[in-house]
Image (cartoon, rainbow, N blue to C red):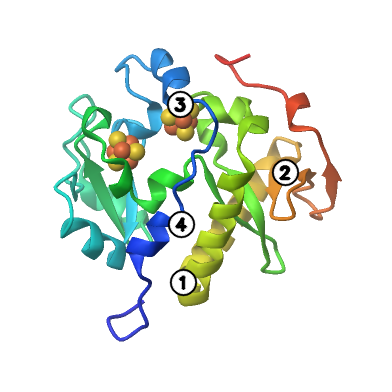
Amino acid sequence: MDNDSPQIDFESLLVGFNASTTPIDCGTMCAPHNPSGKPFCCDICHAVPVAYKPEWDYLKTRTTLWHLWRGDECSDEPMNPDDLLEETPEHLLLLSCKGPAHCEREFRATSCRQFPFFPYITSDFRFIGLAHDWEFESKCWILSHMEQVTPEYRQEFIKTFDLIFSYWMDDFDSYAALSEEVREHYLTIRKRLPLLHRNGSDYLVSPKNETMKKIDLKKLKSHAPYD
Ligand code: SF4
Ligand code: SF4
């Protein structure tokens, strides 16, 4: 992703990725379980948002909601920004916002909108649906209520990442690596990973050979403290 590459129009991309993840405001479900009282994904002590470099160029000229992450925003656990930057793919920047009390919905980053999901890439390099980061299962209410995720959100998610991947293969490659990491995790815990497929159905995917078994999301085990 360099300056000479064709650029995504982030204004229209963000307009097209605006559906609510669930019919209810999921922040009201998780915030009571966070000692800070903030929804976990909007609490810099729990999640550092990322933005694509051209996305940051778009956001910084339209809102003062964001600044580049310094590492000292979580006063309980200040960090040296170099440590996390080292693990951050080259095409992304780390950001921090003014917090949920000051959120501007139209200027949320793609990373806010996709949370808690990421595009799942198979071992033969196909983007087939939405998977999630298991590390948030004890924090994110949605991960215990995936049946609540709206079809509109799923469609917008797929459309958004189809577009992003059509521009930037390095982003596709990052998610292919993350998907591989997730398969390894599920292999270790001997479980199948839940997938909201782009075909509208839901599956448990074998981390070993990626065979898929159709499931009813309502029957998935929920996670403490949401069980
Ligand atoms: S996406 Fe998850 S962590 Fe974020 S507000 Fe909703 S329930 Fe909370
Ligand atoms: S911009 Fe809004 S949605 Fe994104 S992390 Fe900040 S408060 Fe949460």
* Displayed quadrant of residue 89: bottom left
Instruction: Report crowding for label 4: few under 14, some 14 to 19, many 20 or more residues within 10 A (C-alpha).
Output: some
Label 1 and label 4: CA atoms lie apart by 22 Å
Q: Quadrant of the C terminus?
A: top right
Work out how far the residue at label 4 is from the one at label 2, CA to CA, in angstroms: 35 Å
| Of marks 1 and 4, the one in the foreground | 4
Q: Secondary structure at mark 3?
A: loop
Relative to residue 183, is residue 10 drawn left or right? left
State yes or no: discs 2 and 1 in contact (Cβ < 8 Å).
Answer: no
The x and y percentages for residue 123 are 70, 63
Work out how far the residue at label 3 is from the one at label 2, CA to CA, in angstroms.
Answer: 33 Å
The numbered mark, 3 or 2, whose residue comes first in the sequence reads 3
Q: Which mark is residue 147?
A: none
**Residue corresponding to mark 2:** 187
Q: Residue at x 54, y 53 (%)?
A: 157
Is any atom of residue 183 visible in this view? yes
Q: As shown in the figure, which amino acid type bears the numbered disc 2?
A: Leu
**Mark 3 within 8 Å of ligand 1, using the beta carbon:** yes
Q: Position of residue 149 (x, y in %)?
A: 61, 36
Using the image as rendered, state which of residue 206 and residue 11 is in the foreground.
11
Q: Quadrant of residue 145?
A: top right
Label disc, if present, on residue 16 of the rendered structure: 4
